[in-house]
Amino acid sequence: MMQFRKNSSRRRIEISQRLVYVRFMKLKISQKLLMVFLGIAIVSTATIFILNYAVSSRALTERVKEELMGAVSRSSKEVDNFLSDQKAEVLSLAQLPVLKDLFYSLRFGDYGDFDRKREILESFFLRYQTHKEAIQAIRIVDTRGQVLIKIKELKIRERDKPHPYMPITTVGSLFEKEFFDGLMTLKKGQVWMSNFELGVDSNQFCPPMIRLSTPIFHGDGARAGVLIINIWGKRIEEIINNAMPKDKGYSFIFEKNHLDPQRHGIYLSHPDAGLCFLNQTNKGRLFFADYPDGAELIAREREVIQDPSSGNLIAYAYYSPYISKQRGWYIVTTAYGDKVLEPVIKQKQVMITVSVITFIVVAIAAVLLSRTLTKPITLLSKGAREIGEGDLDHKIAVSSGDEIGNLAKSFNAMSAALKKSIEGKLDAEMRACQAEKLASIGKLAAGVAHEINNPLGNVISISRLLTQDIHNGNNNMEAIRADIDTIIKEGMRCERIIGGLLNFSREVPLHKSMEDINSLIDEVIHGLRYRIKDKKLTVCRDYEKRLPMAYVDKAQIEQVFSNVILNSIHATGEGGTIKIASRAHLQGVEVEISDTGSGISKENITQVFDPFFTTKDVGEGTGLGLAISYGIVQKHMGSINIESELGKGTRCIIILPCDGGGYA
């Protein structure tokens, strides 16, 4: 019962589909095109959706880029504020009265008072550092580079070194340090800042830091010494890392330094600390190793780009605490594309879903339309193929009342008319072919009859005269012998004519060898020199000197050249010119033979290679020369073409292969 219901339901669906098909087939082309336009409308709607996505996603992306650039700019500003605050504090400390009194006592040799003031300052700086986590060390240094006071990491460093010029003790000396000479040139109110680098203590690396220094002067303007404060780099790293949550990206700093190539491109701060300070540790990595296009990137001071390989957004800004375009830091924040562009990705997924649904709808419509339109067209195509294969009785079934159905009716009418036309044409062609055969035979018969009739008439006439001489008793042997020689000569003439016909009608095997075409032409011209001389013709030769050897049958190719040159001799009037040129050709060797003769008319030029065709007077030839030449060249896998204009001469171009092409 269940199976019966399924079959019945399937049958009803089939009937419905058939009804839809029949009704659709009755629609006009315009109605069918309407359905196509509906499909186009659907696609257009999808296109609009996609364009909206492109515009909105671009807007979202630009907004994310702006926020990212804002975060980097804020980081740069915070770093600048931090360093500015530290510089301000260094300047404030340098103005402490007790610090000036310390150097005053030292200047005038009151060493007892100097020691008391030094202890006061050491206690003050120790308490000061306790409240300033960013400070790593504080040092007071005189103009001779001797460290008078040093507070490092909340400890007062022991003064156990004698001063080389005064009866006091020091913590040590900075006189040999590279930066000390520069400190002695600082002006009042000026703050010097060192490189951001790892500290070194007892040949061991310490966390990264920056040194700030400002000069100390006496009341009369004389230089007293310098104040040096080491600032931990940790605070700068904290500022940079706060620019982007760790789950959405990371930040780092690398240095731009065209003044010191060893520092150019080193990482100053990075989530992977092992990459930093390559110039000191020899274990890190340069920024340009991770970003091969970094040189182009740092050509601009600030920008947000998207890495095409990872999809991550990279925002960077140039900041120079040294106030220099040659030396500074690039603060960079990399945001994971799949995190910060999550709204864009979600919107993309929605649009893809909409596009897929639209595509399915359009595809269904396209399939329905295709089946409807292509079926009658397929029948037309099949009918054309049947007629093309010769079945002119094939008829196309007309199943619709639209324009395609009318086209099928017209096609059937056309095939019937075509059949009638072809049958008439075939009949006409058969009659024309028969007439052409009879004409060709007539030409052959006329030419051969005339050629053979003359020598045969001579033979008969001489034979009769010879018979009469014998009956009359004329025994002049010399005359008889001359008559017999004439009979033999005329008989050989008949033999040559018959031989030419036989050569044309049978295949002569090729005996090929590598030949110099220029030499073959010269041999032919030499053989025809008397005929050329008789008509006072000028033969101009233009041979290519390094002409490739041709693989040909020498005797047969000489016959070709002889036939063509003879035709030129016959066609050229007395005092005319025959030009013969040879040159290399892509397919082998090309020979061009031209003359200044009478030329050939347009109606005759297409028949020059036909057997028995000739423009000469009856008895001067049978029209087999060029036909035989054409066959020889074809057997050599070459080509021969003739161009001519009546009254201006003829040009014959022969191309022969250089390799072993053709057949023997």
Image: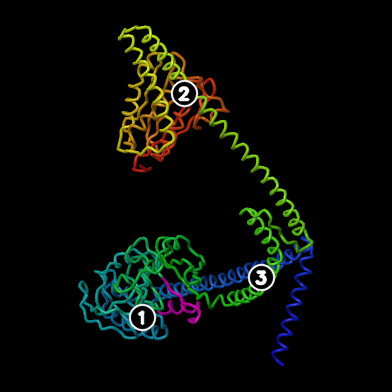
Left or right of 450 on screen, residue 492: left
Given the image, on which type of amino acid does mark 3 rest? Ala
Quadrant of the rendered image containing residue 464: top left
* Residue 378 in the image, given as x and y percentages of width and height: 66, 61
Q: Nearer the viewer, residue 590 or 356?
A: 590
Left or right of 638 on screen, residue 643: right
Residue at 30% in and 9% down = 478
Separation (CA) of disc 1 from disc 2 = 121 Å
Q: Earlier in the sequence, mark 1 or mark 2?
A: 1
Identity of the residue furthest to the bottom in this view: 1
The numbered mark at residue 363 is 3
Number of on-image labels = 3
Q: Is residue 254 magenta?
A: no
Q: Mark 1 points at which residue?
A: 136
Residue at 33% in and 11% down = 480
> Helix, strand or loop at disc 1?
strand
Separation (CA) of disc 3 from disc 2 = 75 Å
Q: Which of 351 and 134 is in front in this view?
A: 351
Magenta-drawn segment: 234-253
> Helix, strand or loop at disc 3?
helix
If the image is split into quadrants, where does the N terminus sit?
A: bottom right
